[in-house]
């Protein structure tokens, strides 16, 4: 698990392709003291496992599923990436609970400066937008952000100059793709209330007002 509070930036130094899979070599801008091979590191919001480690350089393997879900299919050597090592149980939870399992991609639609804030709008598929709520949380390229406004195809967030300076979000041009992870709680709640056994199964009658009344949770 992660918090969405970016620890620092890194640079994508190498890309090896094997069929639909990839291996990335990343050099962190900060020391990786205490990190070991096998540890989880979120790279632009995707939870990846360090398979080699030497100084500030580490390598991670990307499965075909990860490549297809994320912006990594378009990655190039020299790209700057957000990095966060896994949350420790003793750490403060400053952002929100982020699993590092990217749900899909969005793109930066617009940027506007208002006083000391930078307003960013992102376009996303409706399948992701359904899990967003005003003042809820979303991870964009691994950055924990609060949603100002949202509809069925987009959402808006406000960031401070510090966030723009220390993460890749300040480098993104309009139109740039981003990794999106929606709040994990909303997905579980939907699964339980819709009565699905699998994600592809049509929704059955789940929890509704009639069920709550019949089981004693509501007064008749």
Image: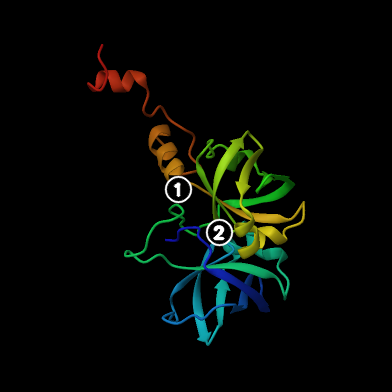
In the image, 23 versus 21, the foreground residue is: 23
- Spot occupied by residue 137 in the image (x, y as percentages of width and height): 50, 45
- Spot occupied by residue 201 in the image (x, y as percentages of width and height): 48, 39
In the image as oriented, which residue stretches furthest toward the top? 220
From the viewer's perspective, is 165 left or right of 45?
Answer: right
In the image, 132 versus 169, the foreground residue is: 169
- Spot occupied by residue 173 in the image (x, y as percentages of width and height): 77, 56
In the image as oriented, which residue stretches furthest toward the front? 115
**Residue 4, numbered circle:** none
Please tell me how crowded label 2 is: few (under 14), some (14-19), or many (20+) other residues with Cα within 10 Å: many
Dot 1: element: helix
- Label 2 vs label 1, nearer the camera: 2
- Sequence-first disc among 2 and 1: 2
Q: How is the image coloured?
A: rainbow
Question: In the figure, 24 relative to 188: above or below?
Answer: below
Question: In the figure, 9 relative to 1: above or below?
Answer: below
Dot 2: element: loop
What residue do we see at 58% from left, 43% from top?
128
Q: How many marks?
A: 2
What residue do we see at 59% from left, 77% from top?
29
What residue do we see at 72% from left, 75% from top?
78
- Spot occupied by residue 205 in the image (x, y as percentages of width and height): 40, 27
The span from disc 2 to disc 1 (Cα, nearest Å) is: 14 Å
In the rendered image, which residue does mark 2 sit on? 142
From the viewer's perspective, is 16 left or right of 46?
Answer: right
From the viewer's perspective, is 135 left or right of 154?
Answer: left
**Residue 184, numbered circle:** 1
Asked which quadrant contains residue 132, the reply is top right
In the image as oriented, which residue stretches furthest toward the bottom? 54
Asked which quadrant contains residue 195, the reply is top left
In the image, 107 versus 118, the foreground residue is: 118
In the image as oriented, which residue stretches furthest toward the left? 216
């Amino acid at each position: 698990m992660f918090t969405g509070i970016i620890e620092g930036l890194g640079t994508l130094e190498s890309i090896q392709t094997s069929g639909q899979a990839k291996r990335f070599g990343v050099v962190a801008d900060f020391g990786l003291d205490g990190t070991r091979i096998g540890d989880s590191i979120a790279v632009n919001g995707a939870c990846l496992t360090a398979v080699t480690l030497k100084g500030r350089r580490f390598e991670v393997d990307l499965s075909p599923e990860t490549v297809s879900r994320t912006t990594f299919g378009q990655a190039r050597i020299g790209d700057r990436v957000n990095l966060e090592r896994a949350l420790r149980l003793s750490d403060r939870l400053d952002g929100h609970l982020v699993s590092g399992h990217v749900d899909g991609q969005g793109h930066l639609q617009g940027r506007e400066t208002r006083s000391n804030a930078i307003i960013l709008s992102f376009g996303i598929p409706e399948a992701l937008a359904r899990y967003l709520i005003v003042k809820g949380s979303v991870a964009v390229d691994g950055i924990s952000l609060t949603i100002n406004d949202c509809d069925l195809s987009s959402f808006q967030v406000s960031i401070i100059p510090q966030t723009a300076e220390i993460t890749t979000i300040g480098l993104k041009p309009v139109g740039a793709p981003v990794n999106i992870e929606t709040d994990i709680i909303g997905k579980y709640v939907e699964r339980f209330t819709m009565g699905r056994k699998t994600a592809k199964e049509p929704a059955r009658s789940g929890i509704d007002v009639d069920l709550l009344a019949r089981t004693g949770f509501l007064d008749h």
